[in-house]
Protein backbone atom coordinates (compact mmCIF):
# COMPACT_ATOMS: atom_id res chain seq x y z
CA UNK A 1 0.00 0.00 0.00
CA UNK A 2 1.30 3.46 -0.97
CA UNK A 3 0.54 6.69 0.84
CA UNK A 4 -1.52 7.64 -2.21
CA UNK A 5 -3.88 4.83 -1.22
CA UNK A 6 -4.65 6.43 2.13
CA UNK A 7 -8.11 7.89 2.61
CA UNK A 8 -8.40 11.45 3.92
CA UNK A 9 -11.37 13.16 5.53
CA UNK A 10 -12.22 15.85 8.07
CA UNK A 11 -14.48 15.20 11.06
CA UNK A 12 -15.93 17.89 13.30
CA UNK A 13 -15.59 17.38 17.04
CA UNK A 14 -16.80 20.27 19.16
CA UNK A 15 -14.96 23.34 17.91
CA UNK A 16 -12.26 21.32 16.17
CA UNK A 17 -12.20 20.01 12.61
CA UNK A 18 -9.88 16.99 12.71
CA UNK A 19 -8.02 15.72 9.66
CA UNK A 20 -7.89 11.92 9.52
CA UNK A 21 -5.75 9.59 7.42
CA UNK A 22 -7.10 6.05 7.15
CA UNK A 23 -6.08 2.64 5.85
CA UNK A 24 -7.85 -0.70 6.06
CA UNK A 25 -11.51 -1.58 6.08
CA UNK A 26 -13.87 0.50 8.28
CA UNK A 27 -15.39 -2.79 9.41
CA UNK A 28 -12.12 -4.03 10.91
CA UNK A 29 -11.05 -3.48 14.53
CA UNK A 30 -10.10 0.21 14.91
CA UNK A 31 -6.69 1.54 15.94
CA UNK A 32 -6.32 5.32 16.40
CA UNK A 33 -2.81 6.81 16.17
CA UNK A 34 -1.79 10.11 17.81
CA UNK A 35 1.42 11.88 16.84
CA UNK A 36 3.75 14.02 18.92
CA UNK A 37 5.88 17.16 18.52
CA UNK A 38 7.03 18.45 16.05
CA UNK A 39 5.11 16.08 13.82
CA UNK A 40 1.69 15.31 12.36
CA UNK A 41 -0.32 12.30 11.21
CA UNK A 42 2.45 11.80 8.61
CA UNK A 43 4.51 10.20 11.41
CA UNK A 44 2.38 7.06 11.00
CA UNK A 45 2.77 6.70 7.22
CA UNK A 46 4.81 3.49 7.57
CA UNK A 47 2.65 2.00 10.33
CA UNK A 48 -0.79 2.49 8.74
CA UNK A 49 -0.24 -0.04 5.90
CA UNK A 50 1.21 -2.58 8.33
CA UNK A 51 -1.83 -2.26 10.59
CA UNK A 52 -4.21 -2.49 7.62
CA UNK A 53 -2.45 -5.61 6.34
CA UNK A 54 -2.95 -7.11 9.79
CA UNK A 55 -6.71 -6.62 9.53
CA UNK A 56 -7.00 -3.29 11.36
CA UNK A 57 -8.89 -0.11 10.53
CA UNK A 58 -5.96 2.27 11.03
CA UNK A 59 -6.74 5.95 11.68
CA UNK A 60 -4.07 8.63 12.14
CA UNK A 61 -5.15 12.03 13.43
CA UNK A 62 -3.66 15.49 13.07
CA UNK A 63 -3.93 16.75 16.64
CA UNK A 64 -6.10 19.87 17.11
CA UNK A 65 -4.58 22.92 15.44
CA UNK A 66 -1.81 20.97 13.68
CA UNK A 67 -1.47 20.21 9.96
CA UNK A 68 -4.85 20.05 8.28
CA UNK A 69 -6.79 20.02 11.56
CA UNK A 70 -8.36 23.43 12.10
CA UNK A 71 -10.59 25.25 14.57
CA UNK A 72 -10.20 24.93 18.32
CA UNK A 73 -6.69 23.77 19.21
CA UNK A 74 -7.68 23.40 22.91
CA UNK A 75 -5.51 24.85 25.67
CA UNK A 76 -2.96 22.11 25.06
CA UNK A 77 -3.61 20.11 28.24
CA UNK A 78 -3.58 16.37 27.71
CA UNK A 79 -7.02 15.95 29.28
CA UNK A 80 -8.33 18.49 26.75
CA UNK A 81 -6.70 16.54 23.90
CA UNK A 82 -8.13 13.30 25.29
CA UNK A 83 -11.57 14.91 25.38
CA UNK A 84 -11.34 15.72 21.67
CA UNK A 85 -10.19 12.19 20.83
CA UNK A 86 -13.02 10.76 22.92
CA UNK A 87 -15.43 12.91 20.92
CA UNK A 88 -13.85 11.64 17.69
CA UNK A 89 -14.25 8.02 18.77
CA UNK A 90 -17.91 8.69 19.55
CA UNK A 91 -18.43 10.54 16.27
CA UNK A 92 -16.92 7.66 14.28
CA UNK A 93 -18.82 5.11 16.40
CA UNK A 94 -15.69 3.05 16.97
CA UNK A 95 -16.22 -0.04 19.11
CA UNK A 96 -13.45 -1.14 21.48
CA UNK A 97 -10.75 0.94 19.78
CA UNK A 98 -7.04 0.77 20.49
CA UNK A 99 -5.31 4.10 21.12
CA UNK A 100 -1.63 4.42 20.17
CA UNK A 101 0.21 7.61 21.07
CA UNK A 102 3.79 8.72 20.46
CA UNK A 103 5.50 11.56 22.37
CA UNK A 104 2.81 14.14 23.24
CA UNK A 105 0.29 11.77 21.66
CA UNK A 106 1.39 9.25 24.26
CA UNK A 107 0.68 11.74 27.03
CA UNK A 108 -2.79 12.29 25.55
CA UNK A 109 -3.29 8.53 25.42
CA UNK A 110 -2.41 8.21 29.10
CA UNK A 111 -4.77 11.11 29.86
CA UNK A 112 -7.50 9.18 28.05
CA UNK A 113 -6.88 6.21 30.36
CA UNK A 114 -7.22 8.53 33.36
CA UNK A 115 -10.46 10.05 32.09
CA UNK A 116 -12.43 7.54 30.01
CA UNK A 117 -13.21 3.85 29.70
CA UNK A 118 -13.97 1.87 26.57
CA UNK A 119 -10.56 1.21 25.03
CA UNK A 120 -9.60 -2.32 24.11
CA UNK A 121 -5.96 -1.46 24.80
CA UNK A 122 -3.58 1.51 24.82
CA UNK A 123 0.00 2.02 23.65
CA UNK A 124 2.28 4.82 24.83
CA UNK A 125 5.57 5.30 22.97
CA UNK A 126 8.79 7.19 23.64
CA UNK A 127 7.66 9.66 26.26
CA UNK A 128 7.67 10.49 29.95
CA UNK A 129 4.22 11.30 31.33
CA UNK A 130 3.79 14.46 33.46
CA UNK A 131 3.59 13.54 37.14
CA UNK A 132 4.53 9.89 36.55
CA UNK A 133 8.02 8.76 37.54
CA UNK A 134 10.64 9.32 36.28
CA UNK A 135 9.12 12.66 35.20
CA UNK A 136 11.04 14.82 37.70
CA UNK A 137 14.36 13.32 36.62
CA UNK A 138 13.53 13.78 32.96
CA UNK A 139 12.68 17.48 33.25
CA UNK A 140 15.80 18.05 35.39
CA UNK A 141 18.02 16.60 32.65
CA UNK A 142 19.81 19.49 30.89
CA UNK A 143 19.52 17.57 27.62
CA UNK A 144 15.76 18.15 27.85
CA UNK A 145 16.24 21.94 27.90
CA UNK A 146 13.51 22.48 25.31
CA UNK A 147 10.76 21.57 27.80
CA UNK A 148 11.44 24.78 29.75
CA UNK A 149 12.05 26.83 26.61
CA UNK A 150 8.75 25.79 25.06
CA UNK A 151 6.89 26.69 28.24
CA UNK A 152 8.12 30.29 28.09
CA UNK A 153 5.32 32.64 26.99
CA UNK A 154 5.66 34.05 23.45
CA UNK A 155 9.45 33.70 23.12
CA UNK A 156 9.49 30.30 21.32
CA UNK A 157 7.07 31.60 18.69
CA UNK A 158 9.23 34.69 18.17
CA UNK A 159 12.47 32.75 17.73
CA UNK A 160 11.18 29.71 15.86
CA UNK A 161 8.82 31.49 13.46
CA UNK A 162 10.66 31.71 10.15
CA UNK A 163 13.13 29.04 11.30
CA UNK A 164 10.80 26.09 11.75
CA UNK A 165 12.64 23.65 9.50
CA UNK A 166 16.07 24.34 11.00
CA UNK A 167 14.74 24.17 14.55
CA UNK A 168 12.86 20.91 13.99
CA UNK A 169 15.89 19.43 12.19
CA UNK A 170 17.92 19.77 15.38
CA UNK A 171 15.64 17.30 17.16
CA UNK A 172 15.44 14.88 14.25
CA UNK A 173 19.24 14.74 14.23
CA UNK A 174 19.98 14.34 17.94
CA UNK A 175 17.06 12.13 18.98
CA UNK A 176 17.31 9.45 16.29
CA UNK A 177 19.53 6.42 15.99
CA UNK A 178 19.52 7.00 12.22
CA UNK A 179 18.42 10.49 11.17
CA UNK A 180 18.04 9.41 7.52
CA UNK A 181 14.78 7.71 8.54
CA UNK A 182 13.22 11.18 8.50
CA UNK A 183 13.96 12.36 4.97
CA UNK A 184 14.22 15.90 3.69
CA UNK A 185 10.74 15.55 2.18
CA UNK A 186 9.36 14.35 5.52
CA UNK A 187 10.89 17.34 7.24
CA UNK A 188 9.28 19.70 4.76
CA UNK A 189 5.95 18.03 5.49
CA UNK A 190 6.37 18.54 9.23
CA UNK A 191 7.47 22.17 8.89
CA UNK A 192 4.39 22.76 6.74
CA UNK A 193 2.18 21.21 9.46
CA UNK A 194 3.31 24.04 11.79
CA UNK A 195 3.44 26.76 9.13
CA UNK A 196 0.98 29.09 10.86
CA UNK A 197 1.54 31.03 14.05
CA UNK A 198 -1.51 29.27 15.50
CA UNK A 199 -0.02 25.83 14.85
CA UNK A 200 3.27 26.81 16.48
CA UNK A 201 1.42 28.04 19.54
CA UNK A 202 -0.73 24.90 19.64
CA UNK A 203 2.44 22.80 19.77
CA UNK A 204 4.16 24.92 22.41
CA UNK A 205 1.00 24.94 24.52
CA UNK A 206 1.38 21.18 24.90
CA UNK A 207 4.48 22.02 26.96
CA UNK A 208 3.02 25.04 28.74
CA UNK A 209 0.32 22.85 30.26
CA UNK A 210 2.72 20.26 31.75
CA UNK A 211 2.17 21.55 35.33
CA UNK A 212 -1.58 21.26 34.82
CA UNK A 213 -1.14 17.79 33.33
CA UNK A 214 0.87 16.61 36.33
CA UNK A 215 -2.09 17.50 38.56
CA UNK A 216 -4.82 16.13 36.30
CA UNK A 217 -3.28 12.80 35.29
CA UNK A 218 -4.23 10.76 38.31
CA UNK A 219 -5.14 7.07 38.38
CA UNK A 220 -5.66 5.30 35.05
CA UNK A 221 -8.31 2.64 34.61
CA UNK A 222 -7.70 -1.04 34.08
CA UNK A 223 -7.14 -0.88 30.31
CA UNK A 224 -4.11 -2.97 29.26
CA UNK A 225 -1.21 -0.61 28.56
CA UNK A 226 1.83 -1.28 26.41
CA UNK A 227 4.77 1.07 26.95
CA UNK A 228 7.40 1.14 24.19
CA UNK A 229 10.75 2.91 23.86
CA UNK A 230 13.42 2.86 21.20
CA UNK A 231 16.48 1.08 22.52
CA UNK A 232 18.58 4.20 21.78
CA UNK A 233 16.30 6.42 23.89
CA UNK A 234 17.58 8.12 27.03
CA UNK A 235 16.60 6.41 30.28
CA UNK A 236 15.97 2.91 31.58
CA UNK A 237 12.81 1.03 30.65
CA UNK A 238 12.48 -0.43 34.17
CA UNK A 239 12.27 3.07 35.66
CA UNK A 240 9.27 3.86 33.47
CA UNK A 241 7.61 0.55 34.29
CA UNK A 242 8.05 1.18 38.01
CA UNK A 243 6.56 4.66 37.61
CA UNK A 244 3.48 3.35 35.82
CA UNK A 245 2.96 0.70 38.48
CA UNK A 246 3.20 3.31 41.24
CA UNK A 247 0.72 5.50 39.34
CA UNK A 248 -1.82 2.67 39.45
CA UNK A 249 -1.47 0.90 36.09
CA UNK A 250 -2.55 -2.65 36.83
CA UNK A 251 -2.04 -4.26 33.40
CA UNK A 252 1.32 -3.18 31.97
CA UNK A 253 3.58 -4.63 29.30
CA UNK A 254 6.87 -3.00 28.28
CA UNK A 255 9.24 -3.52 25.39
CA UNK A 256 12.21 -1.97 23.63
CA UNK A 257 12.22 -1.34 19.89
CA UNK A 258 15.60 -2.33 18.45
CA UNK A 259 17.46 0.10 16.23
CA UNK A 260 15.34 3.09 17.15
CA UNK A 261 15.75 6.35 19.01
CA UNK A 262 12.94 8.72 19.92
CA UNK A 263 11.13 8.60 16.58
CA UNK A 264 10.57 4.84 16.61
CA UNK A 265 7.47 4.74 14.33
CA UNK A 266 9.65 6.09 11.52
CA UNK A 267 13.04 4.66 12.45
CA UNK A 268 11.79 1.10 12.96
CA UNK A 269 8.17 0.86 11.77
CA UNK A 270 8.11 -2.91 11.29
CA UNK A 271 9.57 -3.59 14.73
CA UNK A 272 7.22 -1.01 16.26
CA UNK A 273 4.15 -2.56 14.71
CA UNK A 274 5.32 -6.08 15.61
CA UNK A 275 5.44 -5.05 19.28
CA UNK A 276 2.02 -3.41 19.07
CA UNK A 277 0.41 -6.31 17.21
CA UNK A 278 1.85 -8.83 19.67
CA UNK A 279 0.28 -6.84 22.51
CA UNK A 280 -3.10 -6.74 20.78
CA UNK A 281 -3.11 -10.48 20.21
Image (cartoon, helix red, strand yellow):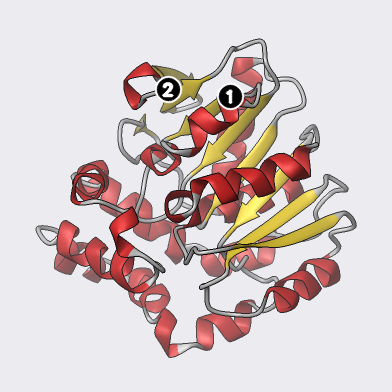
Please give the name of the residue rendered at 38% of the width and 82% of the height, measured from the top-left corner: 145
* Sooner in the amino-acid sequence: mark 2 or mark 1: 2
List x then y, in percent, for residue 273. 60, 43
Where 29 falls versus 251 (above or below)? above
Q: How much space separates mark 2 and mark 1, taking CA atoms?
A: 9 Å
Please state, as top left, top right, bottom left or bottom right, where the C terminus lies in the image: top right
Please give the name of the residue rendered at 90% of the width and 57% of the height, measured from the top-left corner: 250
Helix, strand or loop for disc 2: loop
Please give the name of the residue rendered at 39% of the width and 56% of the height, measured from the top-left corner: 37
Nearest to the observer: residue 22 or residue 2: 2
Q: Is residue 149 visible?
A: yes
Residue 62, image quadrant: top left
> Which residue is label 2 attached to?
1
Classify residue 48 as left or right of residue 198: right
Query: Residue 53 bears which disc, if any?
Result: 1
Where 17 falls versus 220 (above or below)? above
Helix, strand or loop for disc 1: helix
Label 2: few (<14), some (14–19) or many (≥20) C-alpha neighbours in 10 Å:
few
Nearest to the observer: residue 29 or residue 151: 29
Label 1: few (<14), some (14–19) or many (≥20) C-alpha neighbours in 10 Å:
some
Q: Report if the CB atoms under discs 2 and 1 are less than 8 Å apart.
A: yes
Query: Residue 41 bears which disc, if any?
Result: none
Please give the name of the residue rendered at 47% of the width and 67% of the height, measured from the top-left corner: 261
Classify residue 207 as left or right of residue 172: right
Residue 136, image quadrant: bottom right
Please state, as top left, top right, bottom left or bottom right, where the N terminus lies in the image: top left
Classify residue 212 as left or right of residue 162: right
List x then y, in percent, for residue 72. 40, 35
Nearest to the observer: residue 178 or residue 144: 178
Q: Is residue 80 visible?
A: no
Amino acid sequence: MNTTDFRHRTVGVGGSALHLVEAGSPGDPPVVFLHGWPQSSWAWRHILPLAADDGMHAIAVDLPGIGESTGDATNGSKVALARVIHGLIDELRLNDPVLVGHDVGGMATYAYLCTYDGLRAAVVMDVAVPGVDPWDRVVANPQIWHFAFHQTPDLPELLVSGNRAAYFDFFYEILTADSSAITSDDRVTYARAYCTDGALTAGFNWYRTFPQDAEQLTTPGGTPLLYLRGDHEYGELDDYAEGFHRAGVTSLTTDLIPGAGHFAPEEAPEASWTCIARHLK
